[in-house]
Amino acid sequence: MWFRQILAAATDEYGVRLRLTPETLWTNIPDEVRLEMSAGR
């Protein structure tokens, strides 16, 4: 999925690892997308 590309780019280009936590803020993200990302698909 597209968000895996974003995760890889953040790691490769900036040396950071993005991850979801209970404090993650979801703004204007459809439930379907949020659930997919949370499931790691």
Image (cartoon, rainbow, N blue to C red):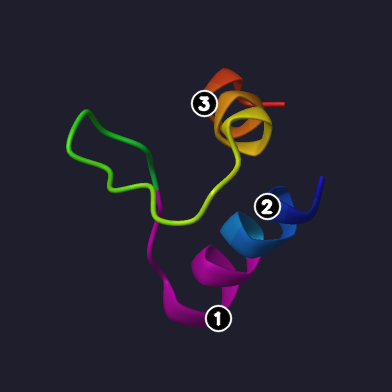
Q: Residues within 10 Å of mark 3 (few under 14, many from 20)?
A: few
Disc 1 versus disc 2: nearer the observer: 2
Q: How far apart are marks 3 and 1 (CA)?
A: 23 Å
Element at badge 3? helix
Picture layout, residue 13 above or below residue 15: below
Q: Distance between the residues labelled 3 and 2?
A: 11 Å
How many discs appear? 3
- Residue at 54% in and 49% down: 29
Disc 3 versus disc 1: nearer the observer: 3
- Asked whether the beta carbons under mark 3 and mark 1 sit within 8 Å of each other, the answer is no
Picture layout, residue 39 above or below residue 13: above
Q: Earlier in the sequence, mark 1 or mark 2?
A: 2
Left or right, 10 with reference to 32:
left
Q: Distance between the residues labelled 1 and 2?
A: 15 Å
Q: How crowded is mark 2: few (under 14 residues within 10 Å), some or many (20 or more)?
A: few
Q: Which amino acid does label 1 sit on?
A: Glu
Q: Name the residue under label 1.
A: 13
Picture layout, residue 10 above or below residue 28: below
Q: Which amino acid does label 3 sit on?
A: Ser
Q: Mark 3 points at which residue?
A: 38
Q: What residue type is labelled 2?
A: Phe
Indicate whether residue 16 is drawn in magenta: yes
Element at badge 1? helix
Left or right, 27 with reference to 24:
right
Q: Residue furthest bottom?
A: 13
